[in-house]
Image: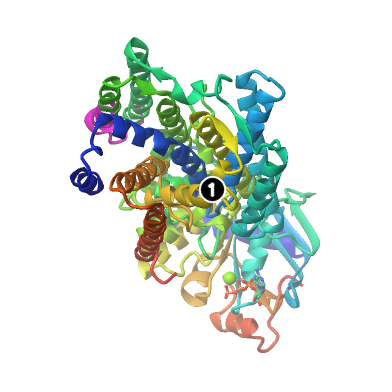
Amino acid sequence: MTLVLFFATQSDVFLTSRNLNNLLIQSTVTGIIALGLVFVLLVGEIDLSVAAISGVASVLMAMLVVDSELPIPLAIAVGVAAGVAIGAVSGRWITLLGVPSFVVTLGVGLVLNGVQLIILPNTGRYNLLNTGVEKLASTNVSGFTAWLLVMAGIALFALARATSTRARFRAGLPASMAGGVVVPVAVVAALLIATLMFLENLRGLPMPVILFISLLGVMSYISSETRFGLYLYAIGNNAEAARRAGIKVERIKIMAFAIAGGMAAFGGILSASRILGVSVSSGGGVGGGALLLESIAAAVIGGVSLFGGRGHVVGALFGALIIATVSNGLNLMGVANEARLIVTGLLLVIAVSIDRGIERIAAPGR
Amino acid sequence: MGADLQGRRRRANLQGQHVGFNKKSFCRRLFQQGAGFSIIDRMSLPILSLKGIYKSFGGVKALVDVSLDLVPGEVVALVGDNGAGKSTLVKIMAGVLRPDQGKYFFEGSESVVHGPAEASAMGVQTVYQDLALCNNLDAVQNLFLGREVTGPWWNGFRISRAECEKRAKGVLKRMRLDSISLNRHVGAMSGGQRQNIAIARSILWEPKVVLLDEPTAALSHAAAEQVGILVRELAGHGMAVLVISHDIHNFVLENSDRIEVLRLGRNQASFSSSEATGEQVVNSMVGGQKSRNLSG
Ligand SMILES: Nc1ncnc2c1ncn2[C@@H]1O[C@H](COP(=O)(O)OP(=O)(O)OP(=O)(O)O)[C@@H](O)[C@H]1O
Ligand SMILES: [Mg+2]
């Protein structure tokens, strides 16, 4: 909030709806990658290859579309599947040998950077203009369809709240219609409708935003309502206790890495569609660069702990928005690229330090 | 000779106890609906039996040729000095550790327990010395961890929080632990509350065998007494109970039928609780004069 006010005073372009629209789209790629990363962070691991996965998957998708002329949905599915597979393999390796995930995924990331260079053609890029792939990012849903989508989202959320509140009433547990259903649904509905009305003034709901919010909803449900989600938190806090409770710790960890891989791949594909092509620098370039840093920063700034077991997937949204706000705002202020890197880097360091501080308060003496 | 005789005495013991603690029983209704008394008819047969167990950690021989029988309806106290191998033995019974050598019999047949989930499915529940709780989860989530109630029927992935909470409430109430908040993270709870949650977790599913590794270590005198009563009550309803404690005088002699002593990873002695004195038990724990050995 303060950030928005600060940049609003510094640049009169910042608050224009066109720029805010831009900002929203900018944050989706980072946000989607961070969303998957949250699952890995929750179990107390880290995946430093997510940016590289996003690069390789997008190049793979582009190759299938341009060279093999595969139908686009199929090419996208293959790209995402490749991401899932890479994540699962890293996860298997890490759990099988008990090696630190940051080293393994750092290595995997470099391997993938190499692979990306190999599968790129000699020109060093695939152009995706007029292939149809660009529609993924450039489509805008407006009018009746947009309202229908938003209403469907609100209805699903309301349904989930209502069923669990009804179950509490039936079980004779303390529950309230207002606290359990009305207030949360009203808040979510207000946020979604406000976003919609704001974006309607432009060209409608951008597809990347729809995709990001849908994925956020699904992942939020998985992490807070299902056994798998609960086990992520249990493992992140006390893996040995989880194991003794009969939880298949390794399998859950592998699944977390697979989800992160799949989401990273999808984020990369979305990014390729937005910038109309893939190249050497897809996926943040060698080592993941700013994309990797910003994805991790988004999750951590969003309150997801690097120590495992604490945080919520919605954090990926807030983190990504904050990062996009900072980089967009600094950009408009005419600050040079190097300064932006420095600010983002510092932001990450500060977020991690706050994370550590919370951890100390929560579990003194560790 | 021993088995038959011991069995009869135990039965007598048990009836005596029942009259005794019906008056102060705080969890009388604990297993009202479940477990019948039919098990007691066959109770002289061990339900869980370890024979010739060896376990080493690197160079440390934690267990050497250890044997132990747990019989339905009987409370066995496992005692021994620090590092004697008690927790290691419990972990082997719970499926957390695999013995290097030795046999594990459950309900008369030899079994290999591949993990904690298998032991728990057989009906062996454990309260670990370190409690094995997840501090970032609340009491309900910890009670049901790994065995969540799911539903509705068309959604087998979703945890049915209401159902879990209802059942958790029931068991905590019957243990007189209603004051424990169901929605607070257990990391924010006191040592005694955490220990009680771990105990509640072990009896939530009406197991056949309950293993408690120092369940009273963090408890007040009154709370420890309640655990003692609970332990008797579980055995009274036909469960086999093993409890580790260092409190020989107040807890072990009061609440167990049989005392098994481990020393330096070996079976040192076995006492009938009604006949042994605290001095005898402590002596054999620290390796004083050879005590009367009933199991031999
Ligand atoms: N995971 C492990 N790795 C290495 N050594 C171990 C491990 N667990 C136990 N030991 C060793 O095995 C021996 C027996 O340990 P155990 O925990 O079973 O003792 P204990 O009887 O429960 O003691 P206490 O009364 O202190 O709880 C000790 O010497 C201990 O150092
Ligand atoms: Mg111990």
**A53 lies above or below B282:** above
| Picture residue at 38% right of the left edge, 70% below the top | B221
State the residue in front, A27 or B282: A27
Task: Using residue B153 as the reference point, say whether residue A160 is left or right of it.
Answer: left
The answer to which image quadrant residue A199 occupies is top left
Q: Name the residue under label 1.
A: A40
Which quadrant of the rendered structure holds the C terminus of chain A? bottom left
State the residue in front, A310 or B259: A310
Whereabouts is ligand 2, in terms of quadrant? bottom right
| Picture residue at 60% right of the left edge, 38% below the top | A279
Residue A307 image offset from top left, x and y in percent:
48, 58
Residue A60 image offset from top left, x and y in percent:
66, 33
Q: Mark 1 lies on which chain?
A: A
State the residue in front, A203 or A39: A203
Is residue B199 part of the magenta span, yes or no? no
Residue B97 image offset from top left, x and y in percent:
69, 60
Is residue A182 part of the magenta span, yes or no? yes
Magenta stretch, main secondary structure, is: helix
Range shown magenta: A170-190
Q: Around disc 1, counting alpha carbons within 10 Å, would you say few (fewer than 14), some (14 to 19), or many (20 or more)?
A: many
**B243 lies above or below A166:** below
Label 1: element kind? helix
Residue B26 in view, yes or no? no
The amino acid marked with disc number 1 is: Val
